[in-house]
Image: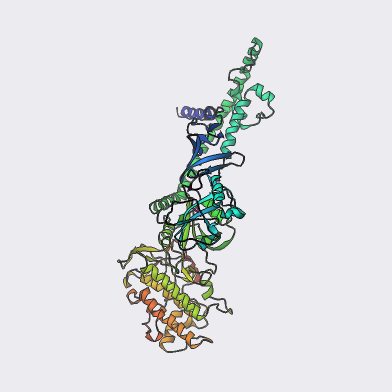
Amino acid sequence: MKRSRSLSVAVLASLLPIFFFLGGCNAVRDDCPPSSCGTLKNITDPFRLNTDPQDCGQTQYQLSCENDQTVLNLTSGIYYVEEISYKKQAIRIVDPGLQKGNCSSFPLYSLPIDDSLSYGNPYQFVGTDVWGWPETILFVKCSVPMNSSLYTAAMCFNTYIQDYLYVIMDDAELSELDTSCTVVLSTPVLKMPQGTQKHNYSKIHDLLLMGFELSWKQDESVYSERMSWKKYLKCMNPIVKANDPNCDMDASIYDLILLPWRYLMPCNNSCNTPFQSCKCFVQFIPCVIRVAFVYMLDVIIVHWAARTLIGVFCVAIFLAYKLRIRDIWMDATVEEFLSKHRYQTPTRYSYSDIKKMTQGFKVKLGQGSYGSVYRGKLRSRRLVAVKMLSKSKGKGQDFISEIATIGRIHHVNVVRLIGFCSEGFKRALIYDFMPNGSLEKYIFPQPGSINPFSWEKTYDIALGIARGIEYLHRGCDMRILHFDIKPHNILLDQNYIPKVSDFGLAKFYPTEESIVSLTDARGTIGYMAPELFYKNIGGVSYKSDVYSFGMLLMEMAGRRRNLNEMAENSCQIYFPLWIYDQLSQGNDMGLENATEDEEEIVKKLIIVALWCIQTMPVDRPSMGKVLEMLEGSLELLQIPSKPFLSSPARVIDEDHASKMNFMGSSVTSDDGLVMQSIP
């Protein structure tokens, strides 16, 4: 009974290809002639009108006919379709607000300058410039008249009675836009006006009436498969097959599966005489033999293969569950956050936009455990740094944290997040490009090399970092704790102005609360505050960032790492402890060829750093007080008490440190402390 049931399953499985084929044949339609609407006569696959049969054309390319005008509905609005080029796979559309012969007609819709049509849209802009983007005309509204050649007056437009309306031809010139002007609308065009047309609004309006082009990409695999089935159905007729040289289907997969069944079909129209009818009937006899042989072969193969396929399928499902379920949860968490905060987040780009702006990830700027950073360029010619994330903590919390914190910050000493990409499991963050890299390579020069920064410049950079952190703590409606202040996360722009970056571990909470709740320690070993390990010395608060800044400031003043096993003198292995003893005893700090003013700068940096790295959080100053100390007089500063936990009980060996230096993973040190680190 059990074997009979297995055999029945195998028999049904062997018939599935035939049922699939018959179902597919019924779905294929050859009676879908081109549709027409108004002057557009060639509407055919992949396009369809909303009045066409459901199996004609493709749903995502549906058009409508309204008042003899073909209409395309995009997320930004409806557009009139003027032309469809199947050879170029491009469709030319026009904004419905523009009217021929009416110079004062105005586009209804604005398309973003640095964005694609919409997320998941089947169309793409047809690029006309060297970067693959469409040429864009900008309408700007100014409160005062403009005399620059950059502006072309829209003379026949009179909607803005109290303002002046102008046209700008190149969005790259937005940086020169007068402060009294704002961008009202941007729209792509087929080509830019040339020569005298640039200053003739009537000619510009004529170019707007030509519209712009969108491209589509036919699903070639589906299309070719569909055509193959149609070709097979046509060539099943023996007369067609004999006279059509393109019917070379004998060796195709369709013949191997379905050739026996062809002879069970009714005879064709050529069987008009009794002899021919008999001849057609005779074909049935070898057909039965061939079908029986193929059927039995199918039963044997399918019966054996079914168990193997089921086993492979179960293994594949198990592996997919183990490997992808975390990513699926993470993607759902990220998308839920983005949908709730879409009006507060920066610009969202598609993955194709990312590849275009980085020229296929051509120039790599750096590599880390989070992923890679590439140089990119926006359509406005603005240079950016694109961080492609290969790993993410938890359910994408570091990605969400970066967008939620830095996405709403605008400060001269905090790096600016311009946009992001979250498409499936591909995620990227787009920042302002920092041509001078991180502070790390400047404060830790190679042996024998000269430090490029003077002590005055080092002091200015320290002030900038302090202002950036102080803004995070007090300048926003929510207090933002960075939790990973270190030289690697301080970037320098073209003028060496410092920018606090990398907010993957950041946490924000109301300013009226002083203590923040953490489930685990976070940060980088050597810069992490002791309360992250020793819960009995105080709660975790903004004072943890103060401690990290103090360790950074100490390294800037010493121009060396705080912990250096290779130091010539054993007492100099841990710099904060050694420099404290030097100051308290009034000894020389070891500066060579330094002026009196430079020595004062270094001494001030060290004293402020010592205040910041006090063991008890309550003994550390706030970042506002740190700024006062840095900007005040050295004579007003007192040397603080010695941080009694500043010196490690023993030097952490490199192997142990490397084990603790993984992003998003918690390990236990020999002291029983749970630590978490980011390289």
Q: Is residue 613 visible?
A: no
For residue 632, above or below residue 341:
below
Looking at this view, is 363 or 45 the one in front? 45
Prevailing secondary structure of the magenta residues: loop
Counting from the top left corner in percent of width and height, residue 457 is at 50, 78
Q: Quadrant of residue 538?
A: bottom left
Query: In the rendered structure, does residue 106 fall within the stretch colored magenta?
Result: yes
Q: Which residue reaches farthest top?
A: 274
In the displayed structure image, the side of residue 426 where residue 277 appears, left or right: right
Looking at this view, is 354 or 253 the one in front? 354
Q: Quadrant of residue 645?
A: bottom left
Q: Where, quadrant-wise, is the N terminus in this rendering? A: top left
For residue 278, above or below residue 34:
above
Q: Is residue 566 visible?
A: yes
Q: Residue at x 44, y 69 (%)?
A: 485
For residue 514, above or below residue 208:
below
Looking at this view, is 531 or 51 the one in front? 51
Q: Residue at x 49, y 59 (%)?
A: 430
Counting from the top left corner in percent of width and height, residue 255 is at 62, 28
Query: In the rendered structure, does residue 186 fall within the stretch colored magenta?
Result: no
For residue 319, above or below residue 485:
above
Counting from the top left corner in percent of width and height, residue 88 is at 61, 42
Counting from the top left corner in percent of width and height, residue 659 is at 47, 65
Looking at the rendering, the stretch of residues picked out in magenta corresponds to: 102-120
Q: Residue at x 49, y 48 (%)?
A: 104
